[in-house]
Amino acid sequence: MTRRSLGRLLLALGATAGLCGPAQAQVADLVSEDSLRVCADPANSPMSNREGTGFENQIAELIAEKRGTPLRYTWFPMVTGFIRQTLQAGRCDLVIGYAQGHELVLNTNHYYTSTHVLITRDDSDLAGAASFADSRLDGKKIGVVAGSPPATHLARRGMIGLAKGYNLVVDRRVEDPAGQMLDDLEAGAIDAAVLWGPIGGPLVKAREGLTAQPLLSEPGTPRLFYRITMGVRAGELEWKHELNSLIRRNQAEIDRILTEAGVPILDDYGTKLKEPPQAAPRRSAPFTPPT
């Protein structure tokens, strides 16, 4: 996969592109000890939003609570330049969700693995389809994010000609490709939809009459599952280690947040759904959106 393709892929997963950060000596003292400063998109539901109802908002609240510091946001749309304008500019110290394996940030250990989902209407003859190999999808119009990994699989199977593409990189304050795709599915303009699971799963859970099936067995590349980490500035190893410890000690609670949101959680190999452990409800102070 080329560097450009990898950058586009990360954008499809909810991560964003930016410029590489300063050297370790320049960033070692930037992490705030007085608050948890999180970089986030103000309109990226179901992941994050200014109202604080996204599942990444809830994870940020958990980390802040366990760290014993208040939560503060720097809001910026997840478009090209997000990392440069937020994390690398020193305006915040943490991106809650970032795909593993890209040099724009220093990755923590991953805190969940997920995959893309195939979404169908419950009253459709496609109901229950969980693979592009399902013969019921032959000749059907499938909605897919242009340039995303599932588009490559559809092209390989000769299904891309009938597919309807939706924009990859957008400012969610003014455009909502995932929501539009599901609107089209409900209206019958497309027969099925394919979305990144942490987006599609929660959106489907909030609607009636739709089912999201994780894509677990698509052969060939690119893979459809990815490990999701938290992102910090390059060189901030102590901060990374602190976050790794927080993730490890609170993994069950993180799993509960993700599961309740509707995010499909997989094992580390992307081969099957993970059964998250039970966790008691968390007590925390109400979230107050900053100005």
Image (cartoon, rainbow, N blue to C red):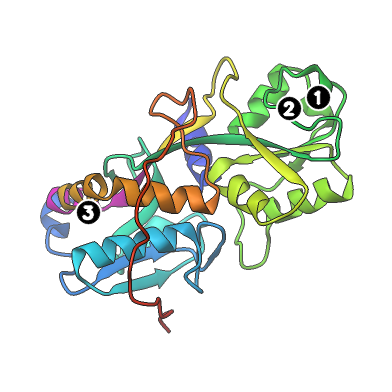
The residue beneath circle 1 is: 137
- What stretch of residues is rendered in magenta? 228-240
Name the element at disc 3. Answer: loop
Residue furthest toward the bottom? 291
**Residue at left offset 83%, top offset 22%:** 136
User: Residue 233: within the magenta?
Assistant: yes
Labelled disc at residue 101: none
Q: Give the left or right position of residue 43, taking residue 212 as reference.
A: left
Position of residue 117 relative to residue 167, above or below, is above
Closest to the observer: 125 or 44? 125
Q: Secondary structure at mark 1?
A: helix
Is 102 magenta? The answer is no
Label 2 or label 1, whichever comes before in sequence order:
2
Q: Dot 2 corresponds to which residue?
A: 129
Quadrant of image for the C terminus: bottom left
Residue 89 percent coordinates (x, y): 31, 64
- Is residue 146 in view? no
Q: Residues within 10 Å of mark 2 (few under 14, many from 20)?
A: many
Above or below for 82 versus 153: below
The answer to which image quadrant residue 287 occupies is bottom left
Q: Judge from the rendering whether residue 173 lies leftward or rightward of residue 282; answer left or right.
A: right
Alpha-carbon span between mark 2 and mark 1 = 8 Å
Question: Which one is in front in this view, the residue at disc 2 or the one at disc 3?
Answer: 2
Residue 165 shown left or right of residue 212 in the figure: right
